[in-house]
Amino acid sequence: MPRPSRHPLTALVRRSLPRPLGRADESYLRLVDRRLAALARIAGGQAARAAVAGMTARDRGLARRALARREAAWHDGDENLVRGYLDRWEAERPPAERARGLVETASALVAIDPPVGVLWFFLWEMESVLAGLFEADKADGPC
């Protein structure tokens, strides 16, 4: 039996997926929950290890596969909506501010219950920000 999502954004993504959910989707949703919890800690000024934040090579591979299956799910309008929130949190800012930008954007998206493409593009962008926070190997692209 799958456990319920801890973060409202993850719950929203869960509801957008076709049923029944496969193991890969369940694993990815658990990873998103871990990542959002780690981002909240970082936004609050605490440190987070890469493994705890879901940034191991295995975790990044899981995210890459989950997002690659949905890459065509978003369009320019979805991207513009997400970037409208995230552009306030430029890469040059301290890690706590960049993490806060992701946390606040996730909350804003939950509040507006956007089309599914917006959710998937946000998760794609979250990969890029996380890679910057944890010095992940960027040779594979944003994910």
Image (cartoon, rainbow, N blue to C red):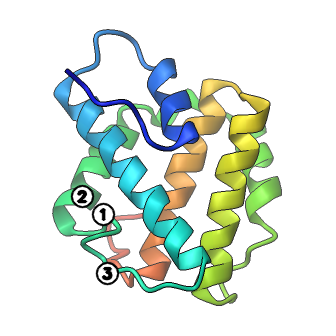
Image coordinates of residue 56 in percent, x first then y, are 22, 69
Q: Secondary structure at mark 3?
A: loop
Circle 2 residue = 59
Q: Quadrant of residue 29?
A: top left
Q: Please state, as top left, top right, bottom left or bottom right, where the N terminus lies in the image.
A: top left
Q: Residues within 10 Å of mark 2 (few under 14, many from 20)?
A: some
Q: Mark 2 vs mark 3: which is more N-terminal?
A: 3
**Left or right: 137 as drawn, with respect to 130:** left
Q: Tell me how far mark 2 sits from mark 3, CA to CA.
A: 13 Å
Whether residue 129 is visible here, answered yes or no, is no
Label 1 with label 2: CB-CB less than 8 Å: yes
Q: Mark 1 vs mark 2: which is more N-terminal?
A: 1
Circle 1 residue = 54
Q: Tell me how far mark 1 sits from mark 2, CA to CA.
A: 6 Å
Image coordinates of residue 60 in percent, x first then y, are 28, 60
Q: Residue at x 43, y 73 (%)?
A: 131
**Left or right: 16 as drawn, with respect to 91:** left
Q: Residue at x 48, y 80 (%)?
A: 133
Q: Tell me how far mark 1 sits from mark 3, CA to CA.
A: 9 Å
Circle 3 residue = 49
Q: Residue at x 31, y 44 (%)?
A: 30
